[in-house]
Image (tube, grey):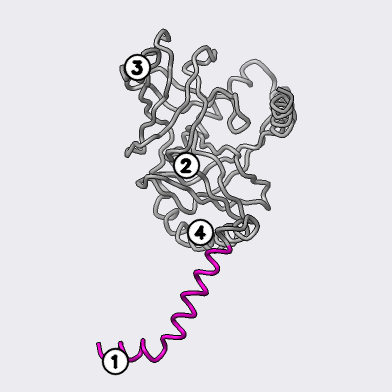
Amino acid sequence: MKNLWLFLVRYNAFFWFVLFFVFSIFLVVQNNNYQRSAFVNSSNVVVGSFYENINSWKEYLSLRITNEQLAEENALLRKQLQNYTSTDSLSDTIAHLTDNVDKSRYDFVVASVVNNSINQKSNFITIDKGAADGVEQDMGVITSNGVVGTVLNVSQHFSTIKSLLHPDTKISVSLDSTNTAFGSLVWGNNTDSRYAMVRDIPNHVKVYVGAPVFTSGYSTKFPKGIKIGHIVQTDLASGESFKDIRVLLTTNFINLNHVYIVKDKMATEKIELEQHNKDNG
């Protein structure tokens, strides 16, 4: 103990220098937008590379679950393809599918999850796709089963996602496929990654346990009609005129390995038009 104390006394100038140096960097990053953005992007690269190496082992250990999910998705795609081929020739089917892709409003970027938290008060996900792959801030992220969250920060080759399991995440949803009843889906202060809440549903709207919940398509983040979950509880009052409902999410955040980043080709046009309305309002 005495030797440690003598060592600290002897080199105290060096330790003070390191302390003040780190503190000065913190102040610069905290109070300057450009430096803060550069720091976030740089840290994304370093942390993302570290998580990518760890995730390669995690992916190997979860290959069985991943293969099961891919098999289920392939079965669904095969069923959809069969619906086309039952009425059209094969050439007509291929032309029809290609035509749909060319005119589609959305593109999708496949990414692997390299880090994921589900037990924190604010949960985030890191993926192995970034600006080099066309990923931008605020893009929606989904799986074949449901919604994952929105892109928060982007570096050249990695991105962080504000998970659906985050108290600040809010998604516009519809309680049926006809978009006649709307609400906002939030995780809130929940501690269970399987459930979320739909807030402020008017009391006159009839809701039933087991009914599906979909994305409304009102934002540029998610296409309309993506299933988010099923209603499991309907008797949660939030006020005199509104009620809350509890939803069992379809996305399995515990075994999340691959995701799709949603790229809305018309997002800029829609956002600029709506901003123009606000400016002239």
Numbered marks: total: 4
Secondary structure of the residue carrying numbered label 3: loop
Nearer the observer, disc 3 or disc 2?
2
The magenta stretch is: 1-28
Q: Are marks 4 and 1 in contact (CB under 8 Å)?
A: no
Rendered residue at 69%/32% (across/down): 267
Q: Earlier in the sequence, mark 1 or mark 3?
A: 1
Towards the viewer: 251 or 56: 251
- Quarter placement of the N terminus: bottom left
Alpha carbon of mark 3 to alpha carbon of mark 2: how far?
25 Å
Going from the N terminus, do you reach mark 4 or mark 3 first? Answer: 4
Pointer 4: what residue?
52
Residue ID for mark 2: 163
Name the residue type under label 2: Ser
Front in this rendered view, residue 265 or 187? 187
Which mark is nearer the camera, 2 or 1?
1
Element at label 4: helix
Q: Residue 259 or 173: which is nearer the viewer? A: 173
